[in-house]
Amino acid sequence: MKEALQMHLESMVSGGEEAPKVKGIAQHIADGVFNPGEIADEYFITEVYIAVPQHA
């Protein structure tokens, strides 16, 4: 999973896109992606630390 995310970010950056900003669960709730108490067993939530590629 980590390698796939790294490859995806590298592709985005090499294509001129910006890497997405880091967000935690609290920010997703604040943004309305999830409602408080809505995160249940059907969600798989994790954190993955990867190096964000820089623009060339």
Image: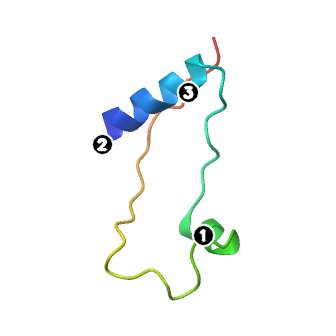
Residue 32 horizontal side relative to residue 6, left or right: right
Name the residue beneath numbered marker 1: 33
Q: Are marks 3 and 2 in contact (CB under 8 Å)?
A: no
Q: Residue 8: x percent and y percent? A: 45, 31
What's under tag 2, amino acid-wise?
Met
Q: Amino acid at mark 1?
A: Val
Q: State how far apart marks 1 and 3 are (Cα).
A: 23 Å
Q: Which mark's residue is nearer the viewer, 3 or 2?
A: 3
Q: Which mark is residue 1?
A: 2
Q: Residue at x 44, y 37 (%)?
A: 50
Report how far apart the C-alphas of labels 2 and 1 lie in the structure: 22 Å
* Other residues around mark 3 within 10 Å, as few (<14) / some (14–19) / many (≥20): some
For disc 3, the marked residue is 12
30 lies above or below 13: below
Figure quadrant of the C terminus? top right
Name the residue type under label 3. Met
Instruction: Give the farthest residue toward the bottom.
Output: 37
Give the quadrant of residue 44.
bottom left
- The residues bearing labels 3 and 2 have C-alpha atoms spaced at a distance of 17 Å
* Labels 2, 1: front one: 1
